[in-house]
Image: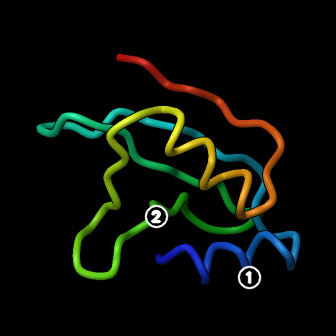
Amino acid sequence: MQEKDIKLLFDAGDLTRADIVPLPMEAGWGLQFNRRKGHPVMMDAQRVQPRRFKTLDAAYKTLIHIGFREARIIAQ
């Protein structure tokens, strides 16, 4: 799911939590969102699934842009 679609879900109140998660087999971080009903969704880029952020700061700035004010960081 791309950022614009996730923002629509956030504005509709469908997202309950955002997690910054390490991506397996890649260096970087991804964003996972829990929905009120249904399975968690990952943020995708236009051509790549999932979207990869090189730094935690970049991932957090995207969450702020969507509207979140807090997120969990999941470390392995």
Q: Which amino acid does the dot numbered 1 rest on?
A: Leu
Near-viewer residue (10 or 53): 53
The residue at 53%/35% (across/down) is: 57
The disc at residue 43 is 2
Q: Which amino acid does the dot numbered 2 rest on?
A: Met
Residue 51 horizontal/vertical position (percent): 34, 60
Near-viewer residue (74 or 29): 29
Q: Relative to 2, does residue 74 appear above or below in the rendering?
A: above
Residue 42 horizontal/vertical position (percent): 45, 60
The residue at 60%/82% (across/down) is: 4
Q: Quadrant of residue 55?
A: top left
Near-viewer residue (55 or 32): 55
Q: Relative to 41, does residue 46 appear above or below in the rendering?
A: below
Distance between mark 1 and mark 2 Cα atoms: 13 Å
Label 1 secondary element: helix
How is colour applied across the structure in the image? rainbow
Q: Relative to 48, does residue 68 appear above or below in the rendering?
A: above
Residue at image mark 1: 8
Q: Quadrant of residue 3?
A: bottom right
The disc at residue 45 is none
Q: Quadrant of residue 21?
A: top left
The residue at 46%/64% (across/down) is: 43
Residue 38 horizontal/vertical position (percent): 62, 68
Label 2 neighbour load within 10 Å: few <14, some 14-19, many 20+:
many
Q: Is residue 51 left or right of residue 24?
A: right
